[in-house]
Every structure is written in C-alpha cells, then in structure tokens.
Image (cartoon, helix red, strand yellow):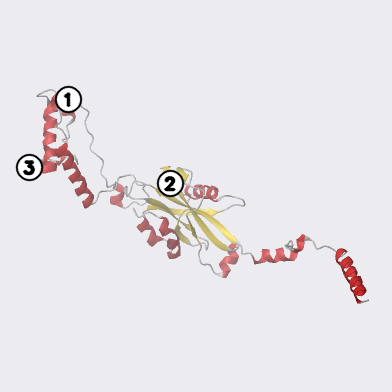
C-alpha cells in the first residue's frame, strides 16, 4: 500500500515537471530596460574635446661639435693623413702651374693644422679674408679666372641676423635647434594666454582632420604643413571649477598632434590669434601655464 502511494506521488510530480513552462535564455543576460539605459546616460560625464597642433621647425644647421667631438675628429684626421698614400700631383696638375702651387700651399697649411710646424705660425699671420674656416686660400675673381676656376663664395655665418636682434617670429633663428610655434589667443575661460594652435571638434570629425582645420583657421593658409600621424602624442586636462564645467558643457580634454612646417609662415588674422613666436623648449616654459607645461614638456625636444 505504501509503495503504491509513493509511485502515484512520483508520477504526479513528474507530469508537473514536464508541463512546467520553460525559462528563456534571456533571463541569464537580460536586455537593459529603458529605465536602466536612461540612468546610465545621466550618470555618464559629458566631455569637450579640442585638437591642438605642435608645429615643429626642424634644425636647419648641423649642431656645433663639442670640445670632445672636435678633439676626436682632429685625432682621426691626423691618423688618416699619416696613413694615406701621397697625392699624385704630377697626374692631376701640370708641373709649375698656378694650380699646382696653390694646391701645394694649401697642403702645407693642412699638414701644419694636423701636425703643427713652422707653417702654423705663418697661417696665424695670414689675413682672415684670404682663408676660409677650413684654412683653404680664397682666390680673388681675377685669380680664379686665371686658374680656370669659379670664384669661391664665402660660407654664410651660423648666427642669423634674427638671433642678434631677438626676432622670435623668424624661422631662420636658432638654426641648430628645434623650434615650436606658440600663439597668443583665448583659452577656455576667454583669457589671453600663450598656447599651441588649437580648436574644437565638429560632430563625427577625426582628431587629425580637426587639427589641420584648426591650424589653418588660427594661423592662415600661407603655410605648407604635414600632420605626422593620426594619433595624439599627449593630452591636457585642465582643472576646472563647477561653473566652468557647466558653461563649457563638461570636462575639457585637449589632444596634441605632431606636425612639421615645410614652407611658408604664420599669418594670423588678429581675431582668434593676436601674436605668435617660434620658440625653443626652454623659451616656451616661462610663457605658458604650469599645468599646461606639465602636459607638454615631455614631448618637446631638448635640442
């Protein structure tokens, strides 16, 4: 009797389990409801994006060698001169010609420069206008024409006129250094500050496209520039008050992109940008805000 009752109970429970409604897989990872998506949208912070351009003028002169480098190069020059085979003057010059005498005189000067000797004293007494930086005699136009050569133009000085006058708008200044374009314009608070060329992004616009557009808008169309890459190399997030965040529409992020100037010059319109300067790294620091400098100092060249 007891076994028959147990069997009937098991049959009823089995039929109940078989006819129980199945639970859908959606219950495992349910889709967000309208109320949850709305709360996420409200909690997500709003941000304002800017694209700035670090426009670089690369060095146009080789760097002046240090004392150690000059000593090393002089030593290597003496070693090569001591080991090389004598120059076959008979093959290249006519015996007794002006060219042969000119080469012999210059060769003695080079020997004195490398190893010293009696010619080094005479070289110091030589007029500065008759020798170039390498100790080679500069022939006058009449002498060059007699020897069948073109007159040698003296080399340009390494110090440009803009370095002497302190013209920071010239692209010819500081030829051995990297220069960066800094402009004077309004920041997010409307205050006139020194900064890199920058501007806001339009809806759906890429960073490098916005950087190119903003550079042209602030600095004019008289420059041939090249945006190096599509990805930023630094970002600046200023500390803002709550009132400033409300007026801007959220947190402010400025992304910096690297660019090179190939030709031309800055021509600001005087509205957005009132002034500009081509500066080295150490010249930029005293002009910009401290938090701004902390964001960009690591991406500027020390040379």
Residues tagged 3 and 2 counted as in contact (Cβ below 8 A): no
The residue carrying mark 1 is 92
Q: How many discs appear? A: 3
Figure check: 57 above or below 87: below
Which of marks 1 and 2 precedes in the sequence?
Answer: 1
**Distance between the alpha carbons at the discs numbered 2 and 1:** 46 Å
Q: Is residue 251 left or right of residue 102?
A: right
Which of marks 2 and 3 precedes in the sequence?
Answer: 3
> Where's residue 9, x and y in %?
90, 72
The residue carrying mark 3 is 117
Which of marks 3 and 1 precedes in the sequence?
Answer: 1
Figure check: 43 above or below 299: below
**Distance between the alpha carbons at the discs numbered 3 and 2:** 49 Å
Q: Nearer the viewer, residue 217 or 258?
A: 258
Residues tagged 1 and 3 counted as in contact (Cβ below 8 A): no
User: In what element is the residue under mark 1?
Assistant: helix
Q: Nearer the viewer, residue 62 or 270?
A: 62
* Residue 104 shows in the view: yes
> Where's residue 57, x and y in %?
39, 47
User: In what element is the residue under mark 3?
Assistant: loop
**The N terminus is located in which quarter?**
bottom right
Q: Is residue 76 left or right of residue 302?
A: left
Residue 100, located in which quarter of the rendered image?
Answer: top left
The residue carrying mark 2 is 260
> Which labelled disc corresponds to residue 80?
none
* Residue 266 shows in the view: no
Residues tagged 2 and 1 counted as in contact (Cβ below 8 A): no
Q: Nearer the viewer, residue 116 or 72?
A: 72
> Where's residue 28, x and y in %?
74, 63
Q: Residues within 10 Å of mark 2 (few under 14, many from 20)?
A: some
Which residue sits at x=42%, y=45%? 261
């Amino acid at each position: 009797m007891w076994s028959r009752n147990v069997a009937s109970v098991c049959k009823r429970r089995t039929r109940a389990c078989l006819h129980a409604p199945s639970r859908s897989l959606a219950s495992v990872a349910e889709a967000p409801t309208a109320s949850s998506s709305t709360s996420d949208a409200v909690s997500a912070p709003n941000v304002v994006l800017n694209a700035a351009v670090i426009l670089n003028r690369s060095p146009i002169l080789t760097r002046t060698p240090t004392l150690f480098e000059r000593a090393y190069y002089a030593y290597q020059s003496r070693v090569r001169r001591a080991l090389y085979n004598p120059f076959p003057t008979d093959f290249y010059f006519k015996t007794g010609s002006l060219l042969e005498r000119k080469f012999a005189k210059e060769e003695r000067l080079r020997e004195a420069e490398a190893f010293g000797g009696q010619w080094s004293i005479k070289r110091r007494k030589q007029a500065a206008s008759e020798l170039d930086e390498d100790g080679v005699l500069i022939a006058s136009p009449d002498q060059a024409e007699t020897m069948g050569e073109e007159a040698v133009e003296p080399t340009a000085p390494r110090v440009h006129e803009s370095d002497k006058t302190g013209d920071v708008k010239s692209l010819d200044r500081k030829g051995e250094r990297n220069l960066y374009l800094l402009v004077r314009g309004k920041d997010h608070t409307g205050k006139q500050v020194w900064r890199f060329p920058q501007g806001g992004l339009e809806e759906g616009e890429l960073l490098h496209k916005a950087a190119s557009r903003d550079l042209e808008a602030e600095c004019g169309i008289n420059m041939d520039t090249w945006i190096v890459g599509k990805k930023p190399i630094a970002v600046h997030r200023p500390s803002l008050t709550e009132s400033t965040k409300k007026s801007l529409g959220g947190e402010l992020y400025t992304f910096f992109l690297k660019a090179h100037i190939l030709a031309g010059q800055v021509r600001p319109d005087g509205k957005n940008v009132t002034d500009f300067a081509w500066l080295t790294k150490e010249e930029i620091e005293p002009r910009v805000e401290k938090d701004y400098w902390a964001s960009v100092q690591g991406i500027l060249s020390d040379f």
